[in-house]
Protein backbone atom coordinates (compact mmCIF):
# COMPACT_ATOMS: atom_id res chain seq x y z
CA UNK A 1 0.00 0.00 0.00
CA UNK A 2 1.31 3.43 -0.87
CA UNK A 3 1.73 6.10 1.80
CA UNK A 4 -1.18 8.20 0.53
CA UNK A 5 -3.44 5.13 0.63
CA UNK A 6 -2.41 4.34 4.19
CA UNK A 7 -3.03 7.95 5.21
CA UNK A 8 -6.45 7.98 3.54
CA UNK A 9 -7.59 4.62 4.92
CA UNK A 10 -6.20 5.40 8.39
CA UNK A 11 -8.29 8.57 8.36
CA UNK A 12 -11.33 6.43 7.52
CA UNK A 13 -10.55 4.17 10.51
CA UNK A 14 -10.21 7.20 12.75
CA UNK A 15 -13.58 8.55 11.58
CA UNK A 16 -15.23 5.17 12.05
CA UNK A 17 -13.96 4.99 15.64
CA UNK A 18 -14.80 8.65 16.32
CA UNK A 19 -18.36 8.19 15.11
CA UNK A 20 -18.86 4.89 16.92
CA UNK A 21 -17.65 6.42 20.18
CA UNK A 22 -19.56 9.67 19.58
CA UNK A 23 -16.44 11.75 20.11
CA UNK A 24 -15.61 15.24 18.92
CA UNK A 25 -11.99 14.59 17.90
CA UNK A 26 -10.27 11.91 15.86
CA UNK A 27 -8.66 9.19 17.99
CA UNK A 28 -4.90 8.71 17.99
CA UNK A 29 -3.11 5.38 17.59
CA UNK A 30 -3.17 4.65 21.33
CA UNK A 31 -6.94 5.10 21.46
CA UNK A 32 -7.44 2.82 18.48
CA UNK A 33 -5.16 0.19 20.05
CA UNK A 34 -7.05 0.44 23.33
CA UNK A 35 -10.37 -0.11 21.55
CA UNK A 36 -9.02 -3.04 19.52
CA UNK A 37 -7.81 -4.53 22.80
CA UNK A 38 -11.27 -4.19 24.33
CA UNK A 39 -12.81 -5.73 21.21
CA UNK A 40 -10.44 -8.69 21.48
CA UNK A 41 -11.06 -9.05 25.21
CA UNK A 42 -14.74 -9.21 24.40
CA UNK A 43 -16.09 -7.29 27.34
CA UNK A 44 -16.30 -3.75 28.60
CA UNK A 45 -16.21 -2.37 32.09
CA UNK A 46 -16.69 1.16 33.29
CA UNK A 47 -13.02 1.68 34.05
CA UNK A 48 -9.78 -0.17 33.56
CA UNK A 49 -6.68 0.14 35.72
CA UNK A 50 -3.56 1.62 34.18
CA UNK A 51 -2.06 -1.89 33.99
CA UNK A 52 -5.19 -3.27 32.32
CA UNK A 53 -5.08 -0.44 29.76
CA UNK A 54 -1.47 -1.32 28.96
CA UNK A 55 -2.43 -5.01 28.70
CA UNK A 56 -5.30 -4.13 26.34
CA UNK A 57 -2.97 -2.16 24.09
CA UNK A 58 -0.49 -5.05 24.13
CA UNK A 59 -3.29 -7.46 23.17
CA UNK A 60 -4.19 -5.15 20.29
CA UNK A 61 -0.63 -4.98 18.98
CA UNK A 62 -0.32 -8.77 19.16
CA UNK A 63 -3.68 -9.26 17.44
CA UNK A 64 -2.88 -6.74 14.71
CA UNK A 65 0.54 -8.26 14.04
CA UNK A 66 -0.77 -11.82 14.19
CA UNK A 67 -1.89 -11.64 10.57
CA UNK A 68 1.67 -10.76 9.52
CA UNK A 69 3.00 -13.82 11.31
CA UNK A 70 4.78 -12.06 14.19
CA UNK A 71 2.48 -13.40 16.91
CA UNK A 72 0.14 -16.32 17.37
CA UNK A 73 -2.86 -16.68 19.62
CA UNK A 74 -2.26 -19.28 22.34
CA UNK A 75 -5.51 -19.06 24.26
CA UNK A 76 -7.25 -17.29 27.09
CA UNK A 77 -6.40 -17.36 30.76
CA UNK A 78 -8.85 -18.20 33.55
CA UNK A 79 -10.09 -14.58 33.53
CA UNK A 80 -10.76 -14.67 29.79
CA UNK A 81 -7.85 -12.47 28.74
CA UNK A 82 -6.31 -13.45 25.38
CA UNK A 83 -2.63 -14.40 25.26
CA UNK A 84 -0.23 -14.43 22.35
CA UNK A 85 3.30 -15.59 21.85
CA UNK A 86 5.84 -14.00 19.59
CA UNK A 87 6.69 -16.27 16.66
CA UNK A 88 9.06 -14.06 14.67
CA UNK A 89 11.27 -11.18 15.79
CA UNK A 90 10.24 -7.89 14.22
CA UNK A 91 12.95 -6.20 12.16
CA UNK A 92 14.54 -3.04 13.52
CA UNK A 93 12.43 -0.11 12.41
CA UNK A 94 12.11 3.58 13.03
CA UNK A 95 9.11 4.87 14.98
CA UNK A 96 7.58 6.04 11.70
CA UNK A 97 8.02 2.60 10.13
CA UNK A 98 6.50 0.91 13.20
CA UNK A 99 3.53 3.27 13.08
CA UNK A 100 3.05 2.54 9.38
CA UNK A 101 2.99 -1.21 10.08
CA UNK A 102 0.44 -0.74 12.88
CA UNK A 103 -1.72 1.60 10.80
CA UNK A 104 -1.75 -0.87 7.91
CA UNK A 105 -2.67 -3.72 10.26
CA UNK A 106 -5.39 -1.63 11.93
CA UNK A 107 -6.82 -0.74 8.54
CA UNK A 108 -7.06 -4.45 7.66
CA UNK A 109 -8.57 -5.21 11.07
CA UNK A 110 -11.34 -2.64 10.70
CA UNK A 111 -12.01 -3.64 7.09
CA UNK A 112 -12.52 -7.23 8.25
CA UNK A 113 -15.00 -6.29 11.01
CA UNK A 114 -18.65 -6.92 10.17
CA UNK A 115 -20.45 -3.74 9.20
Image (cartoon, rainbow, N blue to C red):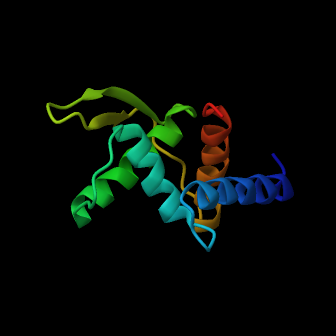
Tell me: 86 left or right of 12.
left
Judge by depth and name the residue closer to the eye, 3 or 90: 3
Judge by depth and name the residue closer to the eye, 9 or 46: 46
Residue closest to the far bottom = 25
Q: Position of residue 67 (x, y in %)?
A: 56, 31
Q: Position of residue 98 (x, y in %)?
A: 58, 58
Q: Where 112 sits versus 90, above or below?
A: above
Q: Residue at x 43, y 42 (%)?
A: 39
Q: Residue at x 19, y 32 (%)?
A: 77
Q: Position of residue 27 (x, y in %)?
A: 58, 66
Quadrant of residue 50 in the image? bottom left
Q: Where 88 sits versus 103, above or below?
A: above
Query: How many badges with numbers are in the image?
Result: 0
Residue closest to the far left = 78
> In the rendered image, which quarter contains the C terminus?
top right
Q: Position of residue 110 (x, y in %)?
A: 63, 41
Tell me: 14 left or right of 58.
right
Tell me: 86 left or right of 19.
left
Tell me: 47 left or right of 13.
left
Judge by depth and name the residue closer to the eye, 31 or 95: 31
Q: Where 14 sits versus 107, above or below?
A: below
Quadrant of residue 12 in the image? bottom right
Amino acid sequence: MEDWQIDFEWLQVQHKVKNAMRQEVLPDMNTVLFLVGIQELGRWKKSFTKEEKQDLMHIAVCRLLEESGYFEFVGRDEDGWPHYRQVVEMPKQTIQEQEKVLKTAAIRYFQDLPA
